[in-house]
Image: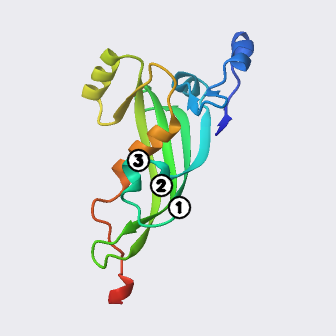
Amino acid sequence: MVYVARGTPPPDCASLMERVPAAAPGSGTFDAARLIRDHGMLEGELDAVALPRVADQLMEGGAPVAWRISGSTDAVGRPALTIELEGELPLECQRCLGVYRWPLRHTTQVLVARDDAEMARLDNDSELEVVLATGPLDPAELVEEELVLAIPFAPLHPQCPTHA
């Protein structure tokens, strides 16, 4: 996991930022509030086969997914994370039952809530998904959730190889 901060923090925050990174080294987690405040970015790659809620939808071998999570705000200035996924997933074509290498290019924005009350309010006030960030977040969990939402219910080749 790579962390990149954009912009320059105020001088009074510089020493604190050196001691408290947005991505906790070796933990695989990150501080969403800090990532948003710094307009930072995390990126990495994982194999979708290792994700329990996605693995049973994949046909064969590995399915590397590159991901990027950026701290941002939504159109009205609320704290948010932008999640970008890119890869190719081996799904089963529902027409020919062959392997369909589905091109994954997915970008979404999720609002970030600090507590349950804020989560309920944001959920009622917005069409965007809301993530509760009372502690460090795991990027693999965010990626898995977005993959579950992005994978088509009935994947189909544009033109099945067996019917060409």
Q: What colour scheme has been applied to the protein in the rendered image?
A: rainbow
| 4 to the left or right of 139 | right
| Quadrant position of residue 27 | top right
Counting residues from the start of the chain, the first of labels 3 and 1 encountered is 3
Q: In whole angstroms, how far apart are the C-alphas of marks 3 and 1?
A: 14 Å
**Residue 31: x percent and y percent?**
55, 24
Q: Secondary structure at mark 2?
A: helix
Quarter of the N terminus within the rendering = top right
Q: Label 2, label 1: how many angstroms apart (C-alpha)?
A: 6 Å
- Under tag 3, what secondary structure? helix
The answer to whether residue 20 is above or below residue 76 is above
Amino acid type of the residue that numbered disc 1 sits on in the rendered structure: Gly
> Which mark identifies residue 49?
2
- SS at badge 1: loop
Q: According to the image, label 1 marks what residue? A: 62
Number of the label disc, if any, that sits on residue 52: 3
Circles 2, 1 touching at the beta carbon (< 8 Å): yes
Residue at 52% x, 22% y: name it.
33
Image quadrant in which the C terminus is located: bottom left
Total number of numbered labels?
3
Where is residue 120? Give x, y as percent: 28, 22
Q: Residue at x 41, y 72 (%)?
A: 100
Say whether disc 2 or disc 1 marks the residue closer to the N-terminus: 2
Residue 37 visible in the snapshot: yes
Query: Callout 2 environment at 10 Å: few (<14), some (14 to 19), or many (20+)?
Result: many
